[in-house]
Image (cartoon, helix red, strand yellow):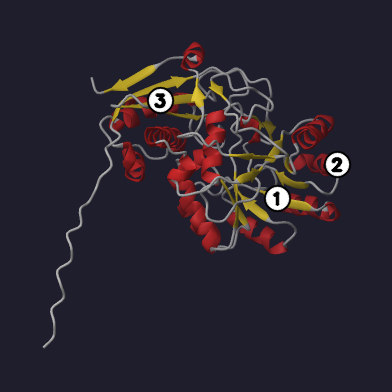
Amino acid sequence: MTSQPSALPTVRVETLPAVTIRRVEIMPLKVQLTFRRTLSKGVVAGDDARPWVGDPVLIRVESTDGVVGCGQVRPPTPWLGETTDSIVAALRHYYGPALIGANALERELIGPMLERLLPANSVALAGVDMALHDLVGRTYGLPVYALLGGTRRVIPLDWSISLNPIDSMVAEATRAVSEFGVRTICLKMGPSAHWQEDIATFKRVRSEVGHEVEIGIDPNEGYDLSTTLRVLRALEDEHVAYVEQPMHRDDHEGLRLLRAQGAAPLLIDESAIHASDVQRLIAHGCCDGLVLKLWKSGGFSGVRRMATLAEAAGLQTTLGGVAHGSLIEAAACAHVYSSLAVQPMAAEFVLGLNVVDNDPIATPASDFAVRDGSVCAPSAPGLGIDVDIDAARSLALATFIVDDV
């Protein structure tokens, strides 16, 4: 006679107390940066005086327990279509109201819900996602990398050298190496008409920093295929560590042909905004690696999805997002870097670490500073960055409150 299996024991499901959102505060800030960044497309928005275009936006999310989480983003115009004005509108009229009464513990559900509510606003979504993770981490006393299932890592840094006259670029590169110990630098290049100057710049920088330093190049879509090949062949003996997004984001065939030449590892940035883009790039053999950025992928979940696809395809990854003048954004980059299963290449958020401009609204954590060209994510709860709210309000272009009243 076959014995009947015994009944399974009753399982009691314990639930964490909800982290209920009751208030969202949105502050676009006028932060005057002294260090101007120029790329092949021109001066980076926010490094000039135009208001409501490239100014950073601070998002503060408060729970019913009185805990506050913060996120900060700067629109990367002209690479994506968002501006300071559009980010504030998305937060004020769509995402903010939808967050009231939501449980911040359900971050993986909130993101897609907000995306359906108002699609194609990834920078605004990234700011919300940072704030939600900061809120939950502070509520439960955990750093964000631990919430994401990661560990505290030593993160090598990649310094992105602004496109300037050759002497200025050489000076910036040598400072990055000699003063901060950075062992990977990326030279901005382009457009195509300047290819000879770009070659000369690379050779000058290489002669100054030596062959122990990795040097990549990034034309930011400023080259065509023939120019890219011409430059890489001219630098064949100089060891180009990688070439990042040399051609237009939609030129998948050109990128495939370039990669087939094998002149240098090809990293993709502007062509890979969403996970669906990564799938197409992998299918067409267009890249050797991906540049992951919180602001273009809507936050932590988007970056991690793209990283998983890259890891499955055997591609390298790097964590981009310069975070110029923003310790909050730099910390967010450090936390997501520390959560990825396969450690990425050197990360590009060094300019958010008070090396060229001091963050006027945030206090750097003692354990979040550049040491020997590297950094570790802050170990304090949440993102680990404390915001001086009085300083922020003194710089605010406006303040908008969304609450349940």
The spot of residue 346 in percent (x, y) is 66, 46
At label 3, counting other C-alpha atoms closer than 10 Å, the crowd grade (few under 14, some 14-19, many 20 or more) is many
Given residues 221 and 173, the one toward you in this image is: 173
Q: Earlier in the sequence, mark 3 or mark 2?
A: 3
Q: Relative to 280, does residue 121 appear above or below in the rendering?
A: above
Question: Which is in the foreground here, disc 1 or disc 3?
Answer: 3
The spot of residue 60 in percent (x, y) is 40, 25
Q: Residue at 48% across / 15% down in the picture? A: 396
Residue with the most extreme bottom position: 1
Q: Name the secondary structure under disc 1.
A: strand
Identified by mark 2, the residue type is Ala
Find the distance from the CA under tag 1 to the CA under tag 2. Answer: 16 Å
Identified by mark 3, the residue type is Arg
Q: Is residue 320 visible?
A: yes
The residue carrying mark 2 is: 200
Given residues 195 and 262, the one toward you in this image is: 262
Q: Residue at 52% across / 53% down in the picture? A: 307
Q: Earlier in the sequence, mark 1 or mark 2?
A: 2
Identified by mark 1, the residue type is Val
Q: Is residue 116 visible?
A: no
For residue 47, what is the image quadrant? top right
Q: Relative to 1, does residue 130 appear above or below in the rendering?
A: above
The residue carrying mark 3 is: 60
The residue carrying mark 1 is: 243
The C terminus - image quarter: top left
At label 2, counting other C-alpha atoms closer than 10 Å, the crowd grade (few under 14, some 14-19, many 20 or more) is some
Q: Relative to 85, does residue 122 appear above or below in the rendering?
A: below
Question: Which is in the foreground here, disc 3 or disc 2?
Answer: 3
Q: Name the secondary structure under disc 2.
A: helix
